[in-house]
Image (cartoon, helix red, strand yellow):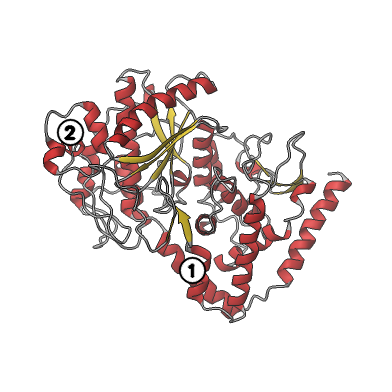
Amino acid sequence: MDSAEQDLLKTAKRLELEKLASITFSPASLAGLEELLHDTYVKQIPEPIDYHNRVDLVRIFNVMAREIYGNGNSSPVVEEYGSFVMDIFNKKSDLDLSINFNNSTEVDRQKKISVLRRFNKKLCSIQRKGHITSVQLIITAKVPIIKLTDRGTGIECDLSVENRDGIAKSYIIQSISTIDERFRKLCFLAKSWAQAQNINSSRDRTLNSLSIVSFVAFHLQTCNPPILPPFSALLKEGADPASVTTVVKNYVNYGKKNSDSLAKLFITLLVKLASVEQLWQNGLCISLYEGSWILKSWGRKSYSISIEDFTDPSQNVSRAVGAEEVNTIYECIHRSLNFISRFLYGQMQGKELMSLLFERRIVATLGVEGTRTMNENENNLPTLEHAFPSKRRRLEGDVALNQVVTQGFQGTEPRGSGGVQQTVGKTAFDSASASFAHTTEQGAIYRRLVDSLVRGYGSVATSHQNTVAPIGNGVIYSQAPPTSHDLPIQSQHIPLQNFLASVRTSHHHVHLPPPSTRHNP
């Protein structure tokens, strides 16, 4: 480490300590904030139906892939990744999907665009029937994608091609989250905060989800004592998810000597980011691999925020952040710290603080001019002609495969409060493939039950033989997962046995290739 890097790192540490000294952490105020953050976390974590809706969409995209490419070995598999796999999503989160082919040859940019054009043609056809909306083919981005929104659930989907790197990173982060539960919880709160502040969108040149997760991981690496180890220790056997999962088992409870509460960690995370606002331009960079600040030059490129990719140090995870947008990000950080300080000094009520931090004030509606507020229906998407056809109209005529895929996007209908209600009648997709029976059960999420549920039928697109288990597994079992007849938790808020049975039945109708014929990561 040269003298310039040492000076920069000392400056970063000094500014952080100075910022921390300006905040008084009384035990009573921290306990109050801890309770508020816990309540916010519980209210926003996904419920069983949020998992089920996303798994169902993955299933439908795989049916669509079969329709486009046929049932041969050349047909791709659509796989989930991102916040859903990392298990830090909420009901408003996007669903990231990757179209992956069986062969291991690298797919160039033009091929990816060609694949997306084929899917886009099918999706536009479905959009004309009113089952999805806001279909956009974006080929000018670094990673070409299709964006669309399922009208039944309100879930926005981002569809890319051969994003194996994104899949691998998602499973690695999911594995690392088992080291200390504070990592997942702080990631969830930080992401919810960024969403509420409208600074969680690489498309809008703000923070992507991996940047937010990286901020949290780095903060836990640089706490005193540290809660997470440098990623170099976790990647010592390789950067594939299976190897990382094996190594991670040796680091469970690594940070047990650090007793900082979630409230204190949330505050100190914002403080750490606020204190280095002016240092990014001097080459300050986050290195999760080293578990420390580093001085880094990107050659001719200049970035507003620098986060070294922990599997490819030549890449900046936060490269999308714009020069103007970084000012917006820091305005949100400083404003949020001010709100928290007022609460700690007894100048603001907890309810008001949580509203300012985690409730989105005004957001743009996709495909609709103007704005709406949080108390409006979250699924209030553009109304299209015959968006929800009558049961008779849906079931008329023969159910060809293209009709199966089209009707499959219907899912559920919006409810006035922004939730979901039972599907009206049975769609043609339901009749053809025994689709999921949607449920209106509401209440707190039981992650152990969801884990059992997902393990029971598996992810419909789990094509990696050597990756960790599919989404929703916050708890690791040493015994076989329970069946639908001996679930570990019984509650009126949990889907009933007939729901679990319908889940397993519907999965059997997706004819994916056996694991042995699919690609390796």
Residue occupying image coordinates x 24% and y 40%: 504
Q: Nearer the viewer, residue 193 or 232?
A: 193
Residue occupying image coordinates x 54% and y 52%: 179
| Quadrant location of the N terminus in the rendered image | top right
Residue occupying image coordinates x 77% and y 56%: 12
- Where is mark 2, residue-wise? 432
- Rounded to the nearest whole Å, what is the CA distance between mark 2 and mark 1? 45 Å
Q: Is residue 294 left or right of residue 69?
A: right
Q: Is residue 402 left or right of residue 31?
A: left
Q: Where on the picture, by quarter, is residue 495?
A: bottom left
The answer to whether 508 is drawn above or below residue 46 in the figure is above
Amino acid carrying label 2: it is: Ala
Q: Please provide percent x and percent y for residue 88.
A: 47, 51
Q: Nearer the viewer, residue 127 or 246?
A: 127
- Where is mark 1, residue-wise? 355
Q: Nearer the viewer, residue 29 or 411?
A: 411
Which residue is the extreme one toward the right? Answer: 3
Q: Please provide percent x and percent y for residue 92.
A: 41, 52
Q: Please provide percent x and percent y for residue 121.
A: 36, 27
Q: Where on the picture, by quarter, is residue 2?
A: top right
Crowdedness near tag 1: few (<14), some (14–19) or many (≥20) residues, C-alpha within 10 Å: few
The answer to whether 436 is drawn above or below residue 220 in the figure is above
Q: Is residue 421 left or right of residue 148?
A: left
